[in-house]
Image: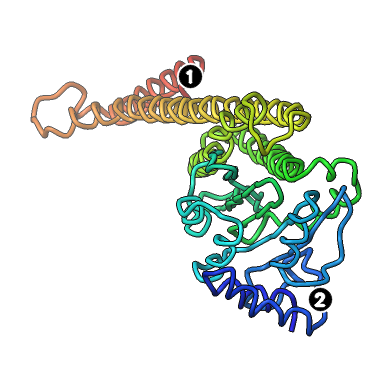
Amino acid sequence: MSMAGNLRKVTGLGRVGGLRKVARLARRGRRVDLSHPARSPLGSSVVNCVAYEEGTRLPLDGDLVDTVERVRKHGAGFVWLGLHEPTNQEFAGMAGLFDLHPLAVEDAIEAHQRPKVERYGETLFAVFKTVCYVEHEELTATSEVVSTGELMVFVGQDFVITVRHGMHGSLGPLREELEADPGQLAKGPSAVLHAVADHVVDEYLNVIDAVQGDIEQVETDVFAENGARADPGRIYQLKRELLELKRAVVPLGRPLLDLSDRPMRVVEPEIQAYFRDVSDHLTRASEQLAGFDELLNSILQAHLAQVTVAQNADMRKITAWAAIVAVPTMVCGVYGMNFDHMPELHWKYGYGMVIGVISVACLALYRAFRRSGWL
């Protein structure tokens, strides 16, 4: 039986005593490396469970409870437990083992939370919105550009619990990067929190760069020769996707400032300087989003102006042709009244003269409208 399978049974119980009885089964089977979601057994919310001491990954010689007790007994190191969309039953035992606040547990399970950082006693609870750029061959009025998820982090003196919602935002590569830098990982759980925040914000910048390409393409199409024929639905779609991105980026500004400035017991003072760097990157992302929003508004206004100009040009053409057609219509209307005594009605050359007058008048009007740019 794998470690994840044992943890799934463990988390179905609400008491630490029950945890211990079932967790003994973990010793019977082979350990499974769950650094990436693809390695997680089907049906398990546990992505990984690793212990670290002085920045070094420790071998798991027991179950989750034994690992936590060993870390607490030594008074050094911490446990990093990764979960993906856990249920209430799966999270119940962990909440009791790590003394997690019920409100924070509810937020972690239900998701759909605003980015925030909250303190519950000795535990810090942080919520991040993860984003992913959705590749597409051509931007349309219904194209999905940005996909979002959520990442919750519980940080205590000797543990880190990450809870991920959504199909992207895997922390496996991030874990490997941290393990390659034992000096940073030795700074404790707050170093993991910083790495997660930095990873999330870096993804914001990557997605923003990708969205910029779509905006530039739309801008090029609008200001092309036939820009008035461009689909305005693409501009509205980009604005909607940009709004989704802003909901992930903008609310995170205040929590990151708190992490970088306010003293917190579970955040090492040395790590707070790193959070200031992350906050600077987030500010850059927020400014870029604000600039994109203004640019899309300008593009939309330019498109509407082009449509108005094109409509005015069409109206001028219609008016010019209507004026030209009015000449023969008026003349023919006069001579169609069938009066007996009309000028030149019985003249031999009357028909040719009328046709000539109509042709000259229409030609003169046509040339006048061409010179004025109406035709």
Left or right: 30 in relation to 85: right
Q: Residue at x 87, y 57 (%)?
A: 57
Q: Residue at x 52, y 68 (%)?
A: 87
Q: Is residue 61 above or below residue 132?
A: below
Left or right: 276 in relation to 84: right
Q: Nearer the viewer, residue 253 or 19?
A: 19
Q: Do the CB atoms of the residues marked 2 and 1 lie less than 8 Å apart?
A: no
Q: Quadrant of residue 345?
A: top left
Task: Give the residue type that dot 2 points to.
Answer: Arg
The picture places residue 34, in percent across and down from the top left corner, at 77, 68
Secondary structure beneath dot 2 equals loop
N-terminal-most mark, 2 or 1: 2
Q: Is residue 204 above or below residue 142?
A: above
Task: Give the residue type that dot 1 points to.
Answer: Arg
Q: Residue at x 65, y 74 (%)?
A: 20
| Residue to which mark 1 is pinned | 367
Residue 230 visible here: no
- Residue 31 numbered mark, or none: 2
The picture places residue 260, in percent across and down from the top left corner, at 67, 27
Q: Nearer the viewer, residue 331 or 315?
A: 315
The picture places residue 42, in percent across and down from the top left corner, at 66, 78
Q: Is residue 194 above or below residue 131?
A: above
Q: Quadrant of residue 280?
A: top right
Q: Nearer the viewer, residue 240 or 194?
A: 194
Secondary structure beneath dot 1 equals helix
The picture places residue 160, in percent across and down from the top left corner, at 69, 52
Q: Nearer the viewer, mark 2 or mark 1?
A: 2
Left or right: 136 in relation to 233: right
The N terminus appears in which quarter of the rendering?
Answer: bottom right
Q: Nearer the viewer, residue 219 or 251?
A: 251
